[in-house]
Amino acid sequence: PLVLVVNGPNLNLLGTREPATYGSETLADVEQRITAACGRLGLRAEFVQSNHEGVLIDAIHAARGRATGLIINAGAYTHTSVALRDAILAVELPMVEVHLTNVHAREPFRHHSYLSDIAQAVIVGAGPLGYVFALELLARRRAAPGS
Ligand code: DQA
């Protein structure tokens, strides 16, 4: 079973981008953690990162019928993108929303997400571990729907 892990704008700069806020792990480090957890959970992960909204939308469309779930950190598009929301709804895949930081403890414009009410779960403020928690949840719900 395949999980698509989608990272949005500026997340390619993880590790060097505002390290006091986002930590020192790079996106490659984070993806490695996810891959390691996949082995343990019997899942496979594919990764996409883009700074372009349409590329993210195309990747989500391409996951339809191929992936069993989505993990999405849409970066700032979280707070702006109806199009990304519609793409997720269109493919009818369970989605877990992840943010490295606790967006609710930050600027008010980060408190609203276009994705949260269509997510199975929302994990904020757990840093890179948030992606691993999201993967665990998708794995468990696959094994035992409703858990
Ligand atoms: C973020 C939070 C967003 O508000 C911000 O625009 C990001 C990263 C996070 O992971 O904490 O780019 O999604």
Image: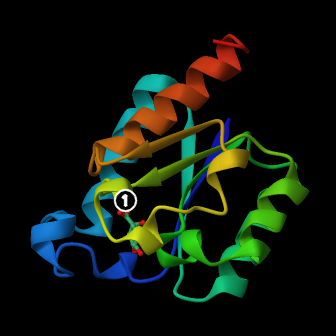
In the picture, measured across the screen, residue 130 lies left or right of residue 23, that is right
In the picture, measured across the screen, residue 33 lies left or right of residue 1, that is left
In the picture, measured across the screen, residue 49 lies left or right of residue 26, that is right
**Front position in the image: 108 or 123:** 108
Q: Position of residue 33 (x, y in %)?
A: 31, 46
Q: Position of residue 96 (x, y in %)?
A: 58, 44
Disc 1: residue Cβ within 8 A of ligand 1's nearest atom = yes
**Total numbered circles:** 1
Q: Secondary structure at mark 1?
A: helix
Q: Quadrant of the N terminus?
A: top right
Residue name at image x 25 percent, y 59 percent: 29
Mark 1 crowd level (few <14, some 14–19, many ≥20, 10 Å Cα)? some
Q: Quadrant of the C terminus?
A: top right
**Front position in the image: 83 or 37:** 83
Residue most extreme to the bottom: 52
In the displayed structure, 21 sits above or below 92; it is: below
In the displayed structure, 62 sits above or below 93; it is: below
Q: Which residue is mark 1?
A: 103
Q: Can residue 4 be spotted in the picture?
A: yes
In the displayed structure, 15 sits above or below 103; it is: below
Q: Position of residue 47 (x, y in %)?
A: 53, 62
Q: Can residue 35 be spotted in the picture?
A: no
In the displayed structure, 26 sits above or below 121; it is: below
In the picture, measured across the screen, residue 92 lies left or right of residue 76, that is right
Q: Quadrant of ligand 1?
A: bottom left
Q: Position of residue 105 (x, y in %)?
A: 29, 56
Residue name at image x 90 percent, y 58 percent: 90
**Front position in the image: 106 or 3:** 106
Q: Quadrant of residue 79?
A: bottom right
- Of the residues shown, which amino acid type is indicated by label 1? Val
